[in-house]
Image (tube, grey):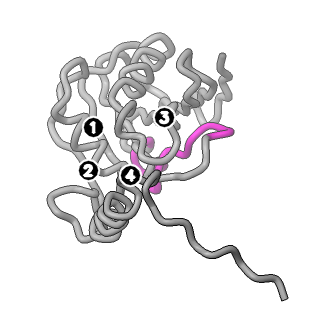
Amino acid sequence: SGSCQPANGRREFSGVAPSGAWYHIKVPAGWHAGGALVMFQHGFDIKPATNPPGLGPLDSVMLAEGYAVAATSYRQADWALFTAIEDNKELLQVFTQIAGAPGEMIPFGGSMGGLIALKLAESPGFPPVHGSYALCPAAAGARLWAPAIDLRLAHDLVCHDARHLPPGEHPHVG
């Protein structure tokens, strides 16, 4: 399902894709099939999506330059890397049905979205990628992983076999 709202000669679409992920698409006036498409990737979000995703901090600049812009909320909340590539393939199908097939794609995102942008640039099944814009991606040994690794190691150490943990004392209510 989806909707279209023309504004300033551009077309805007949003809705829910077959997988359940929300999508948001803006196509500038004069954009034709074969034009460039920026696929914006949002960062980590712990809450499931309840509305269309934003198109990033530069969507007005990109639209003014003639790029179409599209984003998916991903069908998976939290660490969405497990479905992000398939969610973006679905977004590309929705975009192609609405506006026509793009001639090239520019993946763009920050944090987890930056990592997804890098993954999209290397994934088959997308239009040619001549560059990607990955802002502070969670990649290449970024220090933001340190707390996650610490938590995982603590979990593995303490909860590895939780059946055999000694019971603690019951709290005293006084």
Label 2, secondary structure: give it: strand
User: Given this view, does label 3 or label 4 mark the residue nearer the observer?
Assistant: 4
Label 4, secondary structure: give it: loop
Amino acid beneath label 1: Ile
Q: Are marks 1 and 4 in contact (CB under 8 Å)?
A: no
Residue 37 x/y as whole percent: 34, 31
In space, the residues marked 1 and 4 are separated at their CA atoms by 45 Å
In space, the residues marked 3 and 1 are separated at their CA atoms by 18 Å
Label 1, secondary structure: give it: strand
Q: Residues within 10 Å of mark 3 (few under 14, many from 20)?
A: many
Residue 101 x/y as whole percent: 34, 14
Please determine whether, in this image, residue 68 is positioned above or below residue 134: above
Q: Residues within 10 Å of mark 4 (few under 14, many from 20)?
A: few
Q: What residue is disc 1 on?
A: 106
Q: What residue is disc 2 on?
A: 133
- The residues colored magenta run 49-63
Residue 110 x/y as whole percent: 36, 56
Nearer the observer, 62 or 72: 72
In space, the residues marked 1 and 2 are separated at their CA atoms by 7 Å
Q: Quadrant of residue 148?
A: bottom left
Nearer the observer, 173 or 5: 173
| Residue at figure coordinates x 30%, y 30% from the top left | 36
Q: Which mark is residue 161?
A: 4
The earlier-in-sequence mark between 3 and 4 is: 3
